[in-house]
Image (cartoon, helix red, strand yellow):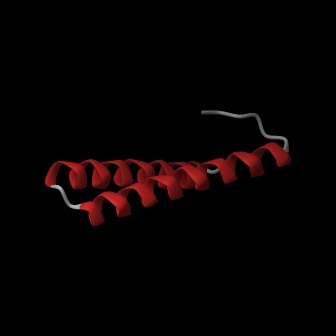
Amino acid sequence: MGIGKKTRNVGKTITGKTKETTGKVTGNKSLEMKGKAEKIRGKAAQAAERGKDTLEGKPFKP
């Protein structure tokens, strides 16, 4: 997995967590759900990249 893709996926996860937390604190359910969805997309993209690396025979680096 390229460092750019890894960084982008981690960024999505962090941004999603931030939106989710902000939504909880402010009572904004819409923002909370959008944040949760973005966090899940980031984690899924990260898992997909790890799968690609495994198929290509690259060692896993967290």
Residue 36 located left or right of residue 40: left
Residue at image x 67%, y 51%?
Answer: 49
Q: Which residue appears at 38% of the width and 48% of the height?
A: 14
Q: Position of residue 18 (x, y in %)?
A: 29, 49
Image label count: 0
**Rendered image quadrant of residue 50:** top right
Q: Quadrant of the C terminus?
A: top right
Residue 21 appears at what percent x and percent y?
26, 47
Work out whether residue 1 or residue 38 is closer to the camera in this orientation and state it: 38
Name the residue rendered at 30%, 57% in the picture. 32
Q: Looking at the image, is 62 positioned above or below residue 17?
A: above
Q: Position of residue 7 (x, y in %)?
A: 49, 49
Q: Is residue 27 left or right of residue 1?
A: left
- The foreground one among 2 and 13 is 13
Q: Position of residue 5 (x, y in %)?
A: 56, 55
Quarter assignment of residue 36: bottom left
Furthest residue toward left: 26
Question: Which residue is at a point 17% across and 48% down the rendered structure image?
Answer: 25
